Amino acid sequence: MDIHIEHKDISLSTLKMQDAEELFNLTEQSRHYLRQWLPWLDQIKKVEDTRTFIKYTLIQNAENKSINVAINYNEQIVGIAGFNELDWNNGIAKIGYWLAEEYQGKGIMLRVVKALIDHAFCTLNLNKVEIRVAEQNSKSRNIPIRLGFVEEGCIRQAEKLYDHYVDHIVYGVLAAEWEKPTEN
């Protein structure tokens, strides 16, 4: 899997078992912030839990069910992004992402998501990309809005975050609507 990104300080890489400690430490450092929006943090308590996640991710990637990659900024892991689900029957990829708080506001995630969309349409030949975001998560909602996605609706109480439910806003963009990168 090679998802191309055009930015000198940012790269995407397939997760490797040797990334476990770095990724776990990033999760630990970001735990309080990420807990607002991600339901899985209580399942990641030690490095071995991160290894289990990486192993699962590699299996899902090999079976073409999902593609998740490390986001590297200046050669260190700063988050995770990818296609949490690949629906080959309907030609739909569902993008998910998270970025450590200290790396936000640098345009990293906007570039990463754009690269994922280009990959979905130009390499995987899919028809649609969806992003579902908690209604109150304005930073994450800003990504599909800035990339020209259409707000398709709200799924009420779509996800349980520890002690409460959150609504998800669904954004979508079709291949026919996406401006494909030009060949040099």
Image (cartoon, rainbow, N blue to C red):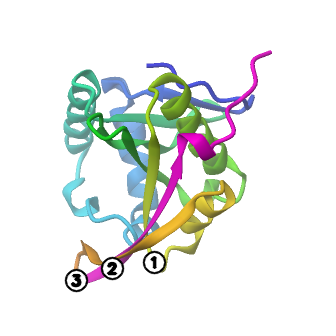
On residue 167, the disc is none
On residue 166, the disc is 2
Circle 3 — which element? loop
Q: CA distance from mark 2 to mark 3?
A: 10 Å
Q: CA distance from mark 2 to mark 1?
A: 7 Å
Report the residue at 45% width, 45% height from top.
Answer: 128
Query: Residue 133, relative to residue 46: is it above or below?
Result: below
Report the residue at 54% width, 51% height from top.
Answer: 173
Counting residues from the start of the chain, the first of labels 1 and 3 encountered is 1
- Residues tagged 2 and 1 counted as in contact (Cβ below 8 A): yes
On residue 135, the disc is 1
Provide residue 11's location: percent of width, then percent of height.
60, 29
**Disc 2 or disc 3, which is closer to the eye?**
2
Report the residue at 23% width, 54% height from top.
Answer: 45
Query: Is 179 one of the magenta-colored residues?
Result: yes
Q: Nearer the viewer, residue 161 or 166?
A: 166
Report the residue at 29% width, 27% height from top.
Answer: 61
**Disc 1 or disc 3, which is closer to the eye?**
1
Circle 2 — which element? strand
> Which image quadrant is residue 115 in?
top right
Under mark 2, the amino acid is Val
Query: Is 18 one of the magenta-colored residues?
Result: no
Under mark 3, the amino acid is Asp
- Look at the image and give the residue range highlighted in magenta: 164-184
